[in-house]
Image (cartoon, grey):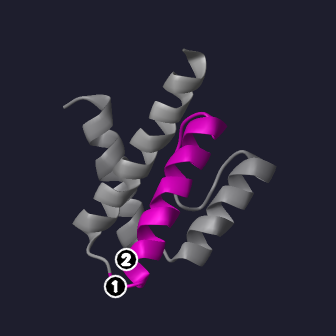
Amino acid sequence: MNRQEIHIKEIKELAKKFTPEQIEGCISQQMHVGTNVCDISGTTEQVINDLSKARFVRDLMDKGMSMTDAVRELAKRIRLVQMAFKEEKE
């Protein structure tokens, strides 16, 4: 399994397990303490990145979107940002 598959799986698990408020608390803890109660590890940048993505997915799910559609929306937005950076470099 490649890193991206593991990454998406982790985001899905976080979005299922925690509320947006709990995820936000974990982001804050990670920034201030260097660890978090959401039990996700890695560099602070990776952890905050993953938690932020999980928060986005969970917010969409709480608005009635299925997890699959919420993850697709996340991927769509990530691609749009990546394309903008790519165009900016050219």
Query: Which image quadrant for residue 11?
Result: bottom left
**Residue 58 can be seen, yes or no:** yes
Q: CA distance from mark 2 to mark 1?
A: 5 Å
Q: Quadrant of the C terminus?
A: top right
Residue positioned 75% across, 49% down in the render: 31
Secondary structure of the residue carrying numbered label 2: helix
Q: Is residue 21 rendered to the left or right of residue 18?
A: right
The quarter of the displayed image where residue 66 is located: bottom left
Read off the residue under disc 2: 61
Q: Which residue is pictured at 63% across the width and 61% down the height?
A: 26
Task: Tell how many labels.
Answer: 2
Identify the residue position indicated by label 1 in the image.
64
Q: Which SS does the magenta portion mostly show?
A: helix
Query: In what element is the residue under mark 1?
Result: loop
Q: Residue at x 59, y 61 (%)?
A: 37
Residues drawn in magenta? 39-64
Q: Residue furthest left?
A: 1
Q: Is residue 45 magenta?
A: yes
Labels 2 and 1 touching (C-beta < 8 A): yes
